[in-house]
Image (cartoon, grey):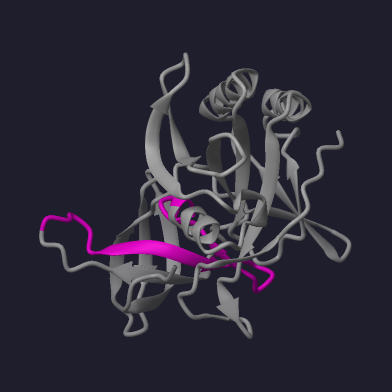
Amino acid sequence: MRIPAPMIQGQLVRRYKRFLADVRLPDGAEITAHCPNTGSMLGCQPDQARVILSESNNPKRKLKYTWELVETQSGIWACINTARPNGQAREAIENGTVKELAGYGNCRSEVRYGSEKSRIDLHLSGHATAPDAWVEVKSVTLCENDGAKGIGYFPDAVTTRGQKHLRELMAQVDSGERAVLLFVVNHTGIDVVKPADHIDEKYGQLLREAHAAGVEVLAYRARLAREGQPDGDLSLTESVPVSLEA
C-alpha cells in the first residue's frame, strides 16, 4: 500500500480545529491541509516538523491536500492518517504478512455486528478449519522512549468508542468465533506496544479482560521510510510484541 503520488513535502505551521493544518511548502507558500486524525496526536505534531502531504484532484473536495506523514522530534517518521490502517491491515492479511490470520478466503470491510450496533473493520471467513475472525484495527503513533526501546501506547486520548469495541470482541469469542485486535504500528520508532493506562485506565483494564477472555491481540509495524526518508510505502512488514503488563 502506498501514498498516492505526488507526495508533497512541507513544514508544519500549526494544527487547529482538529481537522485542519497549515503547512508551508518549499516555495514559501502556505496552504491548509486536511488533518485526518481525531486523536490528540501526542508527539506527532512538533513545531516546524517536516510533513508529507498527498494531493487530490477531486474538484468536489474542499481541501486539496491531506496530511499523511510527520517527522517526529527524534527524526522518526509516523503516519497520522487514520484512514490508512484498515487498508494497511487488509493488504497485510491478504498477502500473508499477518501469519496469524492466514488461510481465510474472504475479507469484508465495515460489517455490522454486535449488541452495541458496531461495525467491525474486517470480517474474515472461508477458512478450511478456523471459525470466522472479527478484526478490529487500531493505529498506534504515540511513542515514548524507555532507554533504547521505543514504547508505543494506545490510545493517545480517552476512547469510549474503543472500550465499546473491546466489549463487542469479547462477545464474539463467547459466541464461538475468533476476535482479534490488530494494532497497526504507524511509527517506525516503536518496538513494543502497551495499553496507555496513564491516559485511559479503563481501556487498559478492558484490554486485559478481553485478552484473558480469548481476544487475540496482535501488532504489526509499517515500514514508512527507507534509509530515514519516506518513500510512500505504508506496507506492514513485521510483527511487534504486545505487552499487557500493568
- Magenta-tinted stretch: 60-86
Viewer-proximal residue, 191 or 35?
A: 191
Q: Residue furthest left?
A: 59
Q: For residue 191: magenta?
A: no
The image position of residue 205, as x and y in percent, is 75, 24
Viewer-proximal residue, 165 or 70?
A: 165
Viewer-proximal residue, 222 or 131?
A: 131
The image position of residue 124, as x and y in percent, is 49, 42
Pick the quarter of the image with the C terminus.
Answer: top right
Taking 37 as reference, is 31 above or below it? below
Q: For residue 64: magenta?
A: yes
Instruction: Kindly indicate the quadrant of the structure image that contains residue 159.
Output: top right
The image position of residue 27, as x and y in percent, is 32, 85
Instruction: Kindly indicate the quadrant of the structure image that contains residue 151.
Output: bottom right
Taking 142 as reference, is 154 above or below it? above
The image position of residue 80, as x and y in percent, is 49, 57
Taking 31 as reference, is 185 above or below it? above
Residue at 59% x, 27% y: name it. 169
Pick the quarter of the image with the N terminus.
Answer: bottom left
